[in-house]
Image: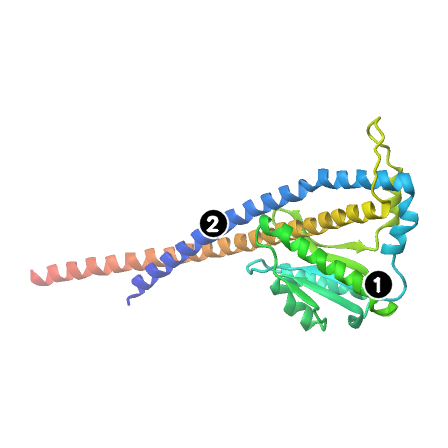
């Protein structure tokens, strides 16, 4: 194969890669938008849950009894950790960033690895945690679309309930799950994401106090008939659902932001290589044309 033919093939390959990268950029941008919209749509749902908690807390002061007993922490016990990574590649330092952040935060909390129960969401984060010496109790695939998030959240909530049930029935105090943290990357800009830590349990008492002290927006005072403990438990399950759904949505938006940034770098590199190949091709093509003209001229001169 001549050098010109090789350059033609390289130019064709670079153009195909350029088209793929452009398509991936478009898909990443669309995904960022839809996941942002999904997270934003949770605001009204979250407000409704907080209104419900306001009603029952105001009426019964439940947070002084049941809530503190069921969701308070102690100086001993294990810590549950849920870390969100990615299931797909080509997203830069996305998994390295969140794993380094989670490990650093856990060290700040002075929690030894043997007192941790870790859930890893996304297969590509597993190696980073295991390399750092952290055992993973359970792994989950990262949701690949909005329609998959709800079922994934429900599955994780079931495992969290099992954590709590095990702790209250069969384990000693030092074995119980008394804290649960979420670690995930959340969107900072269209091409940047930042690691974030959220405490799922124990509940923030100041947050509960703030909800109770909120002013009811209507003149009609709400009432409820079911037992207050049952109602609080139901509302908190919905609250946990919102937090986990938001973690999935923001993590997926951040993943696509990282992928968009990686594709922008790849597109720039491909464009530079394409310019280089095109320049070489034009130069060699011009050289070949010049050589052909010289041969024709030489042959003409020899014939005369």
Q: 269 or 34: which is nearer to us?
A: 34
**Mark 1 surroundings: few (<14), some (14-19) or many (≥20) residues within 10 A:** some
Instruction: Give x and y (percent) for residue 237.
Output: 76, 50
On screen, residue 209 versus residue 269, left or right, reads right
On screen, residue 85 versus residue 286, left or right, reads right
Q: Which residue is mark 2?
A: 23
Q: Is residue 63 above or below residue 140?
A: above
Q: Which residue is mark 1?
A: 168
Element type at marker 1? Answer: helix
What colour scheme was applied to this rendering of the protein? rainbow
Q: Are marks 2 and 1 in contact (CB under 8 Å)?
A: no
Instruction: Give x and y (percent) for residue 22.
Output: 47, 50
Q: Is residue 105 visible?
A: no
Which residue is at the far top? 219
* Residue beneath the point at 88% across and 66% down: 76
Q: 196 or 71: which is nearer to us?
A: 71
Q: Quadrant of residue 282?
A: bottom left
Instruction: Give x and y (percent) for residue 66.
Output: 89, 51
* Residue beneath the point at 83% across and 38% down: 224
Image quadrant holding the C terminus, namely bottom left
Instruction: Give x and y (percent) for residue 99.
Output: 69, 63
* Lower sequence index among marks 2 and 1: 2
């Amino acid at each position: 194969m001549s050098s010109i033919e090789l350059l033609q093939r390289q130019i064709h390959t670079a153009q195909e890669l350029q088209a793929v990268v452009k398509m991936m950029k478009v898909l990443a941008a669309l995904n960022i938008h839809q996941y942002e919209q999904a997270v934003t749509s949770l605001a009204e749902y979250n407000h409704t849950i907080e209104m419900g908690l306001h009603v029952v807390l105001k009426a019964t002061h439940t947070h002084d009894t049941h809530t503190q007993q069921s969701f308070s922490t102690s100086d001993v016990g294990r810590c549950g950790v849920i870390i969100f990574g990615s299931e797909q590649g080509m997203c830069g330092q996305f998994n390295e960033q969140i794993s380094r952040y989670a490990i650093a935060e856990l060290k700040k909390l002075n929690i030894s690895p043997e007192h941790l129960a870790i859930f890893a969401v996304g297969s590509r984060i597993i190696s980073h945690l295991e390399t750092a010496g952290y055992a993973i109790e359970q792994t989950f695939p990262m949701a690949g679309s909005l329609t998959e998030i709800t079922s994934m959240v429900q599955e994780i909530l079931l495992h969290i309930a099992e954590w709590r049930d095990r702790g209250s029935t069969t384990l000693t105090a030092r074995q119980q799950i008394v804290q649960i943290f979420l670690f995930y990357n959340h969107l900072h800009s269209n091409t940047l994401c930042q690691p974030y830590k959220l405490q799922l349990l124990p509940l923030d008492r100041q947050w509960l106090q703030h909800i109770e002290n909120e002013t009811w927006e209507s003149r009609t005072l709400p009432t409820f008939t079911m037992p207050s403990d049952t109602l609080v438990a139901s509302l908190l399950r919905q609250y946990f659902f919102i937090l986990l759904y938001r973690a999935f949505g923001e993590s997926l938006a951040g993943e696509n932001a990282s992928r968009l940034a990686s594709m922008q770098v790849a597109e720039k590199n491909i464009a530079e290589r394409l310019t280089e190949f095109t320049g070489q091709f034009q130069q060699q093509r011009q050289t070949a044309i010049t050589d052909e003209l010289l041969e024709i001229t030489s042959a003409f001169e020899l014939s005369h």
